[in-house]
Amino acid sequence: MFRLITSSRVSAVSAVIRQVRFNSTAGYTEAIAKIRDDLKLNFRLKADVIEKNVIRSILTEVKNLEINNHNKGTNTEYQLYDLFAKMIKERKDSAAEYMKKGNPDRFHQLGLNELRECDYIEKYLNILNLASDEEVDANVKKNYEKIKVQDIYKNIPMKSIEKDWNCSKSQVKESVNRVLNELS
C-alpha cells in the first residue's frame, strides 16, 4: 500500500523542487546542494569550526541574494561567483587591516583566520563550472587587439557574456584590468 521512499529519490525530488521554487539554474542548485552537504558532513564529523562558520556565512549570504532577487529572474552560478568573489575580497581586506604592523598578536591571529576563511570560500568558488581567469583573459586580449583601449568595454558583448564566455560580468571587468596592466 505504501511505498518506501529511498533517500536518493528524496534528494532528487527535493533538488527539482528547490530548482523550481527558487527559479535557479542547474549549476546554481548543484553548488548550493554541495555547500549544504558539506555543512551536514561538518556537523557529523565535528570538523573545523572555522569551516563550519564559513559555510553558514555562505548560506546566509546566498539566502539574502535569493531574497533580493526574488522578482528579478533566475538565480545563476554567475551570481554565486560574484558573491563568493565579494566575500573573498572582504576577508582579504580585513585580514590586511588586522595584520598591520603595530597591532597586537591577537589581531594577527584574527587576520590569519580571515585568510583561512578565504581558502574555504575559494574551494566553493572553484566548484562552479565557469571559465577560468586564463580563458577570460584570452577572450579580453582577443578583443583588445582589435580595438583601442577606450573602446574595449563597448566591444565586449556584456549582455551575452554569460552564455558566450561562460563567466560573470565582474570576472570580465577584473580581467580587463589585468590585461590592460599587463599590456601597458
Image: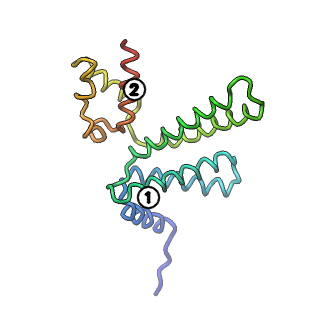
User: Three-letter amino acid code at disc 2?
Assistant: Glu
Mark 2 nearby-residue class (10 Å; few <14, some 14–19, many ≥20): few
Instruction: Report the front residue among 157 and 1.
Output: 157
Q: Say what secondary structure mark 1 lies in.
A: helix
Give the labeled residue for mark 1. Answer: 67
Identify the residue at image location x=59%, y=53%.
56
Image position, residue 173 (x, y; %)? 36, 30
User: Three-letter amino acid code at disc 1?
Assistant: Ile
Residue at the bottom extreme, as displayed: 1
Picture quarter containing residue 103?
Answer: top right
What separation in Å lies between label 2 and label 1 (alpha carbons)? 33 Å
Identify the residue at image location x=78%, y=31%.
105
Residues tagged 2 and 1 counted as in contact (Cβ below 8 A): no
Q: Is residue 160 left or right of residue 61?
A: left
* Count of labels in the image: 2
Residue at the front extreme, as displayed: 102
Mark toward the start of the polypeptide (2 vs 1): 1
Q: Which mark is residue 147?
A: none
